[in-house]
Amino acid sequence: MKNLGIFIILIMLNSCGLVRVSSGSKYERKKVAKVDFCDLSAFKNELIKTRLEYSGVDEYWSARGFNDCELDNTVYLDFREYYENWKHLLIEGQLNRLYDKYWKRKAIMTVIGRFEMDSVTKYGHLGSNNAQILVKSVRINLKRK
């Protein structure tokens, strides 16, 4: 019963964007490079931490930085590791609120993950993105557009 209470508190705190939610996959915090979104292409296949804006329409979602750059709207966020266990329950509420009102909401996220990009592979729905971040940990704050 105690664990259920803690779980409910975690869901409530995360719905406000106050808690970082890990996917549960292991990674070494010491190897995570803090990177500006626009500099990600120099960190291919590395663990990174960055802040970004996430928005989209229907199935087409992508990230952008806070300064205009070449990577804007070409980076997909892959939350697959969250769906390999129960951790998706901690982020689904915020993501669903974002997806359901995409025309008036965006998400400001702090993401830790592996940045993947190559000249052949395409990512996201119908390969509409040139790169992706395989998300290991995320903090989500919903904002009005």
Image (cartoon, rainbow, N blue to C red):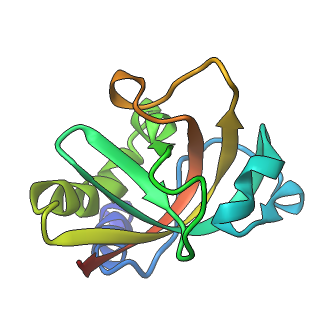
Residue in the foreground of this view, choosing between 2 and 47: 47
Picture coordinates of residue 110, whole percent (x, y) = 55, 69
Picture coordinates of residue 94, whole percent (x, y) = 26, 64
Image: 96 above or below 17: above
Residue at (27, 53) in percent of width and height = 56
Residue that protrudes farthest toward the top in the picture: 120
Picture coordinates of residue 53, whole percent (x, y) = 44, 68
Picture coordinates of residue 48, whole percent (x, y) = 74, 56
Residue at (58, 38) in percent of width and height = 131
Q: Quadrant of the C terminus?
A: bottom left
- Which of the 4 image quarters holds residue 38? bottom right
Q: How many marks?
A: 0
Residue in the foreground of this view, choosing between 86 and 133: 133
Residue at (41, 49) in percent of width and height = 62
Q: Quadrant of the N terminus?
A: bottom left
Residue at (52, 24) in percent of width and height = 122
Residue in the foreground of this view, choosing between 96 and 20: 96
